Amino acid sequence: MHGDEPLARPLLLRLAHELVRAWAAGEPRAQRLLNRTDLHLLPSLNPDGFERAREGACQGQDQDQGQGDAGAGPGRANALGRDLNRSFPDQFAPGPPDLRPVPEVRALMAWMRGNKFVLSGNLHGGSVVASYPYDDSPTHQSSGIYSKSADDEVFKYLAKAYASHHPIMKTGTPNCPGEEDETFKDGITNGAHWYDVEGGMQDYNYVWADCFEITLELSCCKYPPASELQQEWENNRESLLTFIEQVHIGVKGFVRDSATGAGLDNATIAVVGIAHNITAGRYGDYHRLLVPGTYNITAAAPGYVPMTIENIEVKEGAGTEVDFSLQPTVVSPGPDTTQPAATLAPAVVTNTTSPAQAETPTSPHQPVQPVDFRHHHFPDMEIFLRRYANEYPNITRLYSVGKSVEFRELYVMEISDNPGIHEAGEPEFKYIGNMHGNEVVGRELLLNLIEYLCKNFGTDPEVTDLVLHTRIHIMPSMNPDGYEKSQEGDVGGTGGRNNSNNYDLNRNFPDQFVQVADPLQPETLAVMSWLKAYPFVLSANLHGGSLVVNYPFDDDEQGIAIYSKSPDDAVFQQLALSYSRENAQMYQGSPCKNMYPSEYFPHGITNGANWYNVPGGMQDWNYLHTNCFEVTIELGCVKYPNAEELPKYWEENRRSLLQFMKQVHQGVSGFVLDATDGRGIFNATISVADIDHPITTCKDGDYWRLLVQGTYKITASARGYNPLTKTVTVGSKGAVQVNFILSRTDAKAEEGKTLVINPPDTRDPTTKEFETLIKDLSAEHGLEHLVLASSGDAHPYRYHPYKDLSEFLRGLNLNYPQITNLTSLGQSVEFRHIWCLEISNKPNQSEPEEPKIRFVAGIHGNAPVGTELLLALAEFLCMNYKKNAAITKLIDRTRIVIVPSLNPDGREVAQERGCTSKVGQTNIHGKDLDTDFTSKAGNSSGDLVREPETRAIIENLILKQDFSLSVALDGGSLLVTYPYDKPVQTVENKETLQHLASLYASNHPSMHLGQPGCPNKSDENIPGGVIRGAEWHSHLGSMKDFSVTFGHCPEITVYTSCCYFPSAGQLPSLWAENKKSLLSMLVEVHKGVHGFVRDKSGKPVSKAIIVFNEGVKLYTKEGGYFHVLLAPGSHNINAIAEGYQQQHVQVLVRHDVPSSVFIVFDMDNRIFGLPRELVVTVAGATMSALVLTACIIWCVCSIKSNRHKDGFHRLRQHHDDYEDEIRMMSTGSKKSLLSHEFQDETDTEEETLYSSKH
């Protein structure tokens, strides 16, 4: 590779000769190697450089004119002076390299794409060591940075395999001249730790080519004399052979179609815990290098149900054979089917030009142009999309976001270097075409664009750069039904414009100024859900009928044609101009003179409302409800031109389409990070001073804020963190990268409080593994992966009246006895059981440290959808136990309680298809059970009276006070309510209750849109699909109010459908819509704060009172455990227990991982509510006063005693009186030693007696 390091040339030639000779001679090792391995030997990657190098030049002191290390000699670089090992695309580089001066690199990259290499060695000279990825780091520090790959253990294993058999390398001390002190432990080193090499070949192999490559430095002398070659062969022979044999370690096998047995080309192989996937070869064959150990491995392919095999044991030596047989499935509306790749912690960098905005170099290369110019009806378009997804699997992913009215798929083609993955820091872009079915130019241009991007990736620098640094989503047709009704040649008509329900989709989105009366259409709902699922930054909606770029706002409050300026008007103008400038006819501004002679658009752009008023438009909804900036592009005066005109449209718009995509890299981008642990902060707010349009960060804390050139004050803020403002100057070329590192607001504890954020990490490995699972499931598309990876699914297709319900639950209990326990909470008025099913790895056993979640349905008998959803959930969980690793772990660590029908009597009288019927809503006594959970209810005598159904769940579940979360399912709308249902002025813990409700709604495909669209309330608008109960339907005595107040458990109520009792045919779709939301509750119940309370001796303190934010109160369980769900952010905790000092704690709750708190009580040092020191001081002073008083009394008594003696001498003759006096005096003396009261009383009597004697 370096021409002046040619030792590998003769070694590889000798290796080839020896292997062929030994194989022909029947030597077992050679035959085993060559019969089982496709071995490729490339002796010289840089033959031009070699021709300039000189034998015996060990250190290369003579400088080469090209790039290279200091000390590089003639011949290191190629003929154009380029160092080939600095010329590959690099994962940490700001942009792609210029590949024009390195034809050797281009050839090698093409060679890698054409061969499914598994293992590779890159042989160099200049030291004696085995170097492994990564070769560079994000900071590009010259040395000393260990840049670890996801397969670090595998690479170390491979490097040691070579080094341990090399007599010099294994010592770790090469003793190279000038580097005598350089040592390498075990003869291996991480590349970047040795020295940073940007653009190296070994990293490219691993990151982009599924191939594990290490770099082998074979000798201190770069170009040793020929006389030393025999010795070098002896030194390296065994190492070379051993290294080749390592290609067989790990796991290998085939991924096949279970129906046909055909191998699945490009299937993804993912290993749990290693964020680096590989893909299968053309026959479905795969080889995954792994070190010895036990692994869970998943195989996935588009159009197939993923399959996971657990506990695969990998041993030393030959790999373990594991085959996967995947079941075909329909195209899933879920976005991703592959596991997320590793995301590297972003470095804090400022003023970095985004690669996609770098100037495209002038190149003699001519990109390949599309050849497929014709009108594509839906079947033809479908085949086209599948064809390109199949032919370019490394950069494409075909998925559907939903279906049209006539059940045509709304296809999207994703084009990215890592399809199916949101790469942290990489912006997402979308094009949407054919929103109006008879405006077809956009549809065909987007199909042309897909062909253009696929065919030119890897060869055209502009396309390669875009695909490498942008995640591109292309929806050719949003209205496939309307397209099929439209006619070629339509110039300005309306046939096919609307969808099959005859609604204009670009008047169907919720609007900021007017209430859109039309019901939301399936296509609209699908696109809205799609936009909520992906962090789109920039978009264009392609139309026809004029030639102009139209930008927000599309309407105004007055409903007239007037300029309606958005806060980002300057940005939108720049975006619009980036497209129009590249289209000469559009830029002139007078597009359709024959049709609209007076119409003029300066520079080919216009404000939407200034052109004409469009309420309910898609571009405004993008801007107002997501982070995405969208414009509407009118592509031509003729809506449905003849096919022969399509090449002209491509030529006119090709540059515009590409240039507009590049705008996604304008403005400011970066990360918002936690100063404590460096992790990204999800949903942080990015606001720009004087521009009233904040955006939010994605899961990894990454953000993109489009801005025009200028200087801005930008603030990043997040709940629980101190906001940070920076002044940023945005240039005209490329985005400025600005990272915000936020400190937590509780970085300093309040005076007198104990700060406990992260206790000592004493968790066992399984706990850490489970927390990683919770984080993974909380990540973007984490729940989709869980659903797709499940081994089986429930199939609700009919309703279960009471008898069937009972048999179904008994069946689950009998079939899965190890994880279920079925009990009756009580009986209804008509003596039907109120069944309760517990799902846990230890059912009916107390495990206070595990969170407990309650699902309740059927409180209204006329709304049984919730009942069927809970039966489906129970079956889904049971059938995936021990089959799906994630679900197994959730069941093992959660106590799941399901009450499917609280009102079985009402359910028995309710009727299917009774969408608005109230029959069965109450129990047989006519009582609405959701008004029976009152704290004060009674008869005429004042006794507490409740319905038996209510009493059963209150006494046996709610008042146990051991649940962390409760979810109630009801019907009659499509939203989630949180406490309270009763009218109250303040709601304690409101943010947490809202958070839980929003989590359910956001995982539902349409609930979060806030447009239930119920026939009786078609204009109802519920922001986010979440509302406080009292604001929607206020009433007293609700179950969730009682649960919060007396059960100390947050409860939300989910309304699953507008129809109370829809037809059974709708159950499968209702299950599909709610499955992810229900599973999200099982994940969420593990978050919040997990605590343990003990005293200083280590004894657990149970029944301690835990008060959160001076409002929410709960008690510690047996063993001192407590758990509470809280919204992400900083929270205060007070812990109170009798006999102990009150403790104050602050904790930061994250959105994706649980927080742990250990509270240690001190004995209470207060007496009578006062500090012990004060009480002791007062007591001491009191005792001193008592002693002093006693002494004074004794003295007084002594004096009086003498006075009595004198009186005796004077009155001796009165003997009887004297005896009485003596008795009285001695009695008084005894009493005086006991109390002051007696002393006073005696003194009075004594004085009286004495005076009477005189």
Image (cartoon, rainbow, N blue to C red):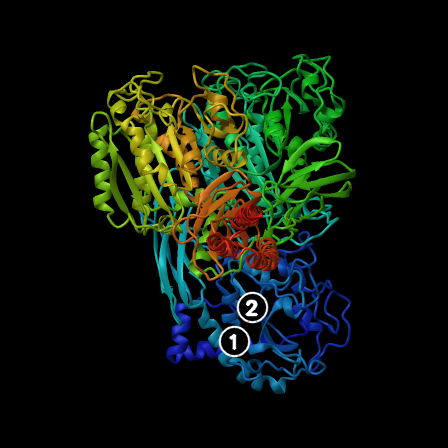
Q: Which mark is residue 1077?
A: none
Q: Quadrant of residue 137?
A: bottom right
Which percent across, then down, holds residue 285?
A: 40, 57
Q: What secondary structure is marked by label 1? A: helix
Of pointers 2 and 1, the one earlier in the residue sequence: 1
Rendered view: 961 above or below 379: below
Query: Is label 2 in a helix, a strand or a loop?
Result: strand
Relative horizontal placement of residue 1082, taking residue 560 as reference (left or right): left
* Three-letter code, disc 1: Tyr
Given contact means CB atoms under 8 Å apart, are the residues at marks 2 and 1 in contact? yes
- Relative placement, left or right, of 43 versus 140 is left
Image position of 242 (left or right of 255):
right
Q: Residues within 10 Å of mark 1 (few under 14, many from 20)?
A: many
Location of residue 203 by image quarter: bottom right
- Number of marks present in the image shown: 2
Which x, y percent locates residue 1099? 43, 59
Residue situated in front as seen by the camera: 1116 or 140: 1116
The residue at which mark 1 appears reads as: 162
Dot 2 amino acid type: Ile
The residue depicted at 53 percent of the width and 40 percent of the height is: 1127
Q: Is residue 29 above or below residue 592?
A: below
From where the camera sits, is residue 110 visible?
A: no
Which disc number belongs to residue 214? 2
- Label 2 neighbour load within 10 Å: few <14, some 14-19, many 20+: many
- Report the residue at 66% width, 34% height from top: 694
Quadrant location, the N terminus: bottom right
